[in-house]
Image: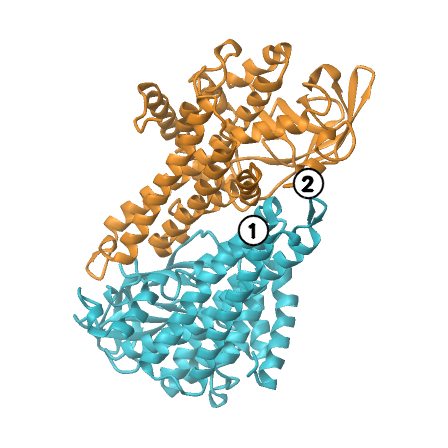
Chain colours: A orange, B cyan
Amino acid sequence: MSFQNTPMQQEVRELARRFAQKELLPFVEQDERDERFRPELIGRLGELGLTGVPVPEEYGGAGMGYQEYIAVIEELAAVNTGYAISVAVTGLAQMCLTLFGSEEQKRKYIPRLASGQGIGAFALSEASSGSDAGSLRTTARLDGDHYVVNGTKLWITQGDLAETIILMARTGGPGPKGVSAFILEKGTPGFRTGKREKKMGWNTSHTYELVFENARIPAANLIGKEGDGFKVALRALDNGRITIGAAALGISRAALEVAVNHAKEREQFGKPISEFQGVSFMLADMATQLDAARLMVQRAAALKDEKLPFSTEAAMAKVFATDSAMKITTDAVQILGGSGYTQDFPVERYMREAKVMQIVEGTNQIQRLVIGRALTQK
Amino acid sequence: MWFFSDEDRMLQQSVRQMAKADLAPRIEALDHEEGFNREAFRKMGELGLLGIIVPEADGGSGLGAVAATIAMEEMGAVDASTTLSYLAHLILCVNQIAKNGSSEQKSRYLPRLISGEWLGGMGMSEPEAGSDALGMKTRAVLKGDHYVLNGTKTWITNGPVGDVFYCYAKTGEGRKDVSTFIVDRGMKGFSTGKKFSKMGMRASPTGELVFDQCEVPVANRVGAEGASVSMLMRNLDLERVTIAGISLGVARAAIETATRYAKERKQFGKPIGAFQQIQERLAEASAWYEACRALTYSAAKMWDEGLLAGREASMSAARAKLQSAQMATQVCLDAIQILGGYGYTREFPVERYMRDAKLMEIGAGTNEVLRIIIAKQMLGEAADAGKPF
């Protein structure tokens, strides 16, 4: 693993940074208040080749690796996490199909997602099954050449905007082995969006309930075979953890930048507050944690790119990067003091956004479970 | 607390009932819309809460810091925003007029502030003078029978909605040449500037006070000219003890919500409370909360008993406030985590608790300033390597 970005990584990062500065920055504060997402910007990202970064070129992706992908996610998240996570979630759907889809499914569904023409989603959680995903209750019953789906999914990112949704539903008995994965198209009869969640932050991102009332999904849209669903979900989430870690890096970096600038400019007691150790040591810890988090996320991405086992490393990177983001953004608010608490500065928003990163894609408690088991069950 | 009197316990019950009836039903909407529960203040007036620490001779209830802290904790557990506005009214305005005002000032202002007809606030912080409060630039110049004030105060709790403000301004060149003026809404040259949108405490309006050739009668100066610093500092100590009560209330509410959820929520076939990661967070939260409660009420009790001299009062108040504020933020963050996806939504109140809790690490002395106050007392001159602390 190199500590230098390759020219390609640098180029992709610059591309994403310019896009974020030009297209996302002008709207972010107002859209956050209005809880608005602009789907057309995903199309624009697609034109730049940034919506299918790690997907093979034969399916319309950029054919690059996770090391390039995390650079894109970080840059978008440094300005507006809503779009970073949108790209990551559409990426999650593509990853499920790339890893487990049939050739026909790949050719039919991946290109529109990879090119940004369509948005993807991933529907696993339910009201009574969050961390315990294997206990999900949504059912899919084979009826001729269709599966009939009933149940409700919860906390589905961009569930209203997605045209292609990877859906986990129970086709067999209780527990993880009874779960299957399906490709669900927007507009499927019997499928609709339910209530929209009101959230603490991360409000440019839409979060919806999905409702299935005898929804009919073609049997051809089963991914793999019956009972593969939980494996599909877990493998996808292994990958997703790397991208959430990358998003946390973006938020942390943005918070640190604002805090450093403020500490240099703000004068109290006749000198910049950066000259007080209480402030400069806080900045030092923030920078150190960010750096460690970055190295961990990069390692997980590099292992994946080299086709080596990365699951534990991805869980460690997700826990550390998101816990660090929570601490870094909280301290950034603290350094800005009264100003930091107001919405005249973005750090309070970063803090609200950091919190969700500790919850999504497997809560940090579940990550610790994964890491602990890897340590003791070898 | 074990030393609460029967009177304290009755107060606790009546504030709890008021909070449930008059604060709880409205706070979710007010938080979202950045509104203000003005009506609650009339209710507090009826219960005697708006003059709780004012001597009975001045129309108050004649209770002390313990009682005020109980009120803060009980209201804070339901609606920290309104409680913060209450603190600004009671501690920063009403109490200061009662303590330092002339008999004319007291008879003019206290009855209507204590009944809830008028709402009070305090003007100290400025854009360039936050932690460095004595670096304030607002000036007051004597001209005949009035002072002319010029300057801007910022982050003023109740600024957009208050009627009476207890304001500090410089009347000389030195850092300690600070005088106090009672400024009424409607005085010539006085306006309340912009209102801030905030992360939390959104139902407690925060704004600027703007003095543009503002004319304040000499009769509205509190105490002697240039003699306000010690009164200002002493009251900050009381503010810190009592605001710690808000942190306690918010933390308690978060712990209760998280505990209930950990018992009810089942994953992997058992309540999540059966998992040690959840147990650890709840146990730590409970221990830290109780430690802060002891620290805070002990400081309040010593204040009431007259056991705290100047510097020890500052130390005790700073310790209680520093720990309680940090505890509340951490406990609320952990409560969200325990509730997971639900905790991040506005269907549960813990995300509001967290947004509110963070303010207590900033308002009434940032964590950083409180650490300096404590360390200075411990280290004496050794802490003074650099001016101007």
Residue A41, how many percent across, how many down?
47, 24
Disc 2/disc 1 C-alpha distance (Å): 17 Å
Mark 2: amino acid? Ser
Dot 2 and dot 1 within a common chain: no
Picture quarter with the N terminus of chain A: top left
Q: Residue furthest right?
A: A143
Residue B157, how many percent across, how many down?
43, 63
Question: Closer to the camera, B97 or B65?
Answer: B65
Label 1, residues with CA under 10 Å away: few <14, some 14-19, many ≥20: many
- Chain bearing tag 2 is A
- Chain bearing tag 1 is B
> Eyeballing the image, is A26 above or below A356?
above
Q: Is residue B372 left or right of residue A164?
A: left
Residue B202, how many percent across, how many down?
50, 55
User: Residue B336, labelled with which disc?
Assistant: 1
Residue A164, how many percent across, how many down?
62, 21
Residue B178 at least partly seen: yes
Residue at 57 percent across and 35 percent down: it is: A206
Residue B70, image quadrant? bottom right
> Eyeballing the image, is A152 above or below B94?
above
User: Residue B370, labelled with which disc?
Assistant: none
User: Residue A129, labelled with which disc?
Assistant: 2
Label 2, residues with CA under 10 Å away: few <14, some 14-19, many ≥20: some
User: Element at badge 1?
Assistant: helix
Residue A18, image quadrant? top left
Camera-near label (2 vs 1) is 2
Question: Closer to the camera, A102 or B239?
Answer: A102
Residue at 50 percent across and 45 percent down: it is: A355
Residue B37 at least partly seen: no
Residue at 25 percent across and 69 percent down: it is: B148
